[in-house]
Structures are given as C-alpha cells and as structure tokens.
Amino acid sequence: MSSSGSPGLSRAIAALGVAIVLVWTLLSGVPTGVGAETRVFGLTVIVAVVCTVLLVRSAPLGLWSGGPMFFVVLVLFHVPLAAFAVTGADIPSDDADYLSLWFIPNEQVLRAVWLVAQALLAFTFGYVLLGRRRPTRSAPAARVIDDEPARARAQTEAAMTLTGTVVVVVTVLYVLGTIAVVEPGLLLGQGGKRLYDATVAANPSLTAGITFTLSGMSLVVAGRRSTVRTVGLVFFGVFAASTLVMGSRTSALYALVGVVVVLARLRPMPRQVIAVLVVVTGLVVVSSVERIRDDGLADTSIGQMLGSPLAATVEMGATLRPVVETVSWIDQGEPHRHGMTFAVGTIRFVELLAGVDRELSADDPRLVGTLLRDRVQHYAIGYSLVAESFLNFGTTGSALLFVGLGMLFGRWDHRGLGRPVNAVVYGVVFSALLATVRSSSTTTVTTILLGLAAVVFSIWLGSIRHRSAERAMQQAADRAARLPPTASEPVPAVAAP
C-alpha cells in the first residue's frame, strides 16, 4: 500500500506547493521597487523549470505526453527573454535592436512576465491535480483478426486513414496550388515572411486549408499502416518542407508536434533524451526559418541556417510582446471582452451561413487581429493565449482558465492510451489548442468542430465498410453451405444388411 500511495502523496504535495505559490502571486501582485526586475524574471524562470519537471514526472508518457509538450511550447514562446534578462546574457539574435524597443523593465513588461508565471503555475496545478490516476491503455490488437469487433476496429482505422489522406492531399494541393498561382516565387524561397504573410492575409481560404491539414494528419497517423497512409505522409512532408521554405515555421511546427503526440498515445516512443534532442533540433530548424523568413532562401547561407538554438529561442520568445501590448491596453482603459474573442470566430461562421451582413475581418472590432492592426506598428506580431485570456477575463480569470486547461490535459493524458479513435480526437483538439500559443483563438473552435466532423465521418464510413464486408462474408458462407459434397469429402458408411 505504501508503494502505491507514495506517488499519490508526492503529487498531492506538489499540487499543494504549486497552489500556494500561485495564490501568493495573485494576492501579492507584481513586485515593485529595487530589484523588482530580478525577482519577477527570476521567479518566472524558476517556475518554468520546476513546473516542467513536475509535469514530466506526473505524465504517463513523460515528455511525450500532450500536457508536458504543450507546456514546453508555451515556455519556449514566452520565457526565453526573461531568462536572458535575469542571467545578463547577451541576446544572440539580429533582433536585439527590435527587442530593445519594447522589452524594457517597465511596469507593463514586469506585469506581462508575472502573468506568464501565473499561467505556468495554474496549468501545472490543474494538470497535477487530475493526473493522479493510473493511465488506461487498451491491450494491443491481435495479429489475427478473427472476431467481429476486431474486424470492425480494423475497418474504422482503415477509414480514418482514407479520410485523413483525402483531407491532407486536397488541402495541400489547394494551398500550394493557390500560392503557385498567386505568388509562385514563395515556393522558391523568394520574398520571405512578409510576402508570405501578405499572401495568406489576402487569401483567407489559405488559412482554412493550412489549419485543416493538421486535423487530417491526426487521422492519418492514427489509422492503419497502408499504401494510402504512405501517400498522406508524403504529401504532409511536401507541405511541411514547403512551408519552411516559404518562411512559415508555425504551420509545420504545430503539425509535427501534433503528429508526435498522437503517435505517442498509440505506440512506444524512444527514451526522453531523444525527445530533448528533437526539441533542440527543432530550435535549429526554427533558427533557420527565421533567417529564411527575413532574407529569403536565396540570400541565406548554410552557416546562417544552422544558427544557434539560443537565437531561435529569442525569436520565439518575442511572443511575449502581445502580452505586453495587452497589459498596456487594459491599463489605458480597454474593457475586458468576457470571452468574446474566443467565440467570435464561430459567431462569424454562423453569420456567414445565415447570410447576416457582417464587417470584413480586417474591420471587425471583435477580432484581436483588428486591434493589433489599429494599435501596433508592424502588427504582424502574432498573439498569445496568455494575452488573450487576460484580455477576456483579467488576472484571476486568466489563472482559472489555465487551471481548467491543465485539468483537461491531466485527465485526458491518462485515459484512452492505445485507442486510435481517442488518439485522433486528442490530436484534433491538441493541434487547435497548440496554435493559440502563438496566435489568437479566432479559428480554434471552428477548427475543432471541422476536425471532429471528419472523425465522425470516418467512423461512419468504417461502419458502412464493416457491414458490407460482413454481408459479403455471410453470403459466401451461405453459398458454401448450399454446395453438394465434393468427391474429396468422405462418404458416410452404410451398415451391412
């Protein structure tokens, strides 16, 4: 009993400790006075490190679990600048001049970093709180499919593969085809980030196509291994390579992380040291993309493409700026939105279906993008879930949202391991939520609903195929039963008179 109770007691103590620190940050407010910068930045860095360890130790798959993976991405996009500041290290990036324009230890910056620390604490508390049960993993499927439930599962997995591959192929062809017509130079690495952003902004359907590709990949990797699945993976590889060449790290990064999380729920993964190497490799790739985005592929040398991973963390860490801007808006009297920015994407979609007159997305004041365009010079700074939760619900409400998000991951990470349908649903939701780390949630709900619709369709298609296969088997059995005995079959013996 002691062996089973000790881990539970350790997690309870960890959750209590995190909760105490979280409540203290909420009640005490942002430190002020001499040394405030060191205390704020130092606490945030310590929180990031300690909470990462707690999450990895609490997760059933370690760093391969979705909760810790989401948390690590959240840290990489919000904490690096605080780490450089508190250690006094030089920023290894060409963006040092840009960062000096807004990353100054003033009241807004300190409050923004404090909000990040609270978000990390809240997520960790929620995850550890509900991550106490042992994971439930279904038994591996039998090699010989000799019963109807196993055949039904096989048909569902095959249908998921087919549906996901169709989604990936269609969306990739549409996205790359549209770009080839509108701005063919992008496919050759010419133009960099600014041209890519302008092209996507001028063609909203590209955003929908890119986003739906992520849902399709969840279906592909959760389905059965087949030639069809290979086709989907090849098209995804072309898509990921193309987006990197064009200067977009976000599309490829989110899709790759989503694929890894789905795979980890279905099959054994390498040791966690491999996960760390994957993260470092990813940082090198991001650093390369940063160069390509700014200078274009033709003007980027191999040495620049293999730049320091620390430079990549600086580029990602600039996501802190939307948090700083949002804090400034609230300080200047901006009212909290009470959830509107989370729902407005779905509202606009319903308005479109209902034929309701609505403003263009560039002019709709309900959208975060409109606020950024009107108030931030060179507004293409992305956005942040930390900033958006604060814009909608304030300090306490933001903490509660992250507690709920941590509870969602803490519960879900421990359930349904080894089940393809659970894995693909997890992948759809995870990919959509992961995108909010670096952008607004305008399309999050719509993306989840479309992805789940694809999952439901694949399950329906699998059931149709299963019933058809079962009828064919039954008809074959009935025909075999009606056939007369063949010559090779034994003839019953007749008793002598």
Image: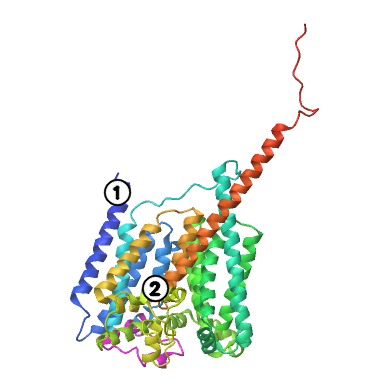
The relative height of residue 455 versus residue 389 in the rendered view (above or below) is: above
In-front residue for pair 135/181: 181
Instruction: Give the magenta part as a residue range.
Output: 83-109
Residue, disc 2: 74
Type of residue at label 1? Gly
In-front residue for pair 47/487: 487
Disc 1: CA contacts within 10 A as few (<14), some (14-19) or many (>=20): few
Q: Position of residue 311 (x, y in %)?
A: 46, 83
Q: Position of residue 163 (x, y in %)?
A: 58, 62
The relative height of residue 15 versus residue 480 in the rendered view (above or below) is: below
Disc 2: CA contacts within 10 A as few (<14), some (14-19) or many (>=20): many
Name the residue located 40 percent from the left edge and 89 percent from the top edge: 373
- Residue 412 is left or right of residue 198, and the answer is left
Snapshot quadrant of residue 318 = bottom left
Residue, disc 1: 5
Q: Position of residue 426 (x, y in %)?
A: 45, 61
- Residue 378 is left or right of residue 203, and the answer is left
The CA distance from mark 2 to mark 1 is: 31 Å
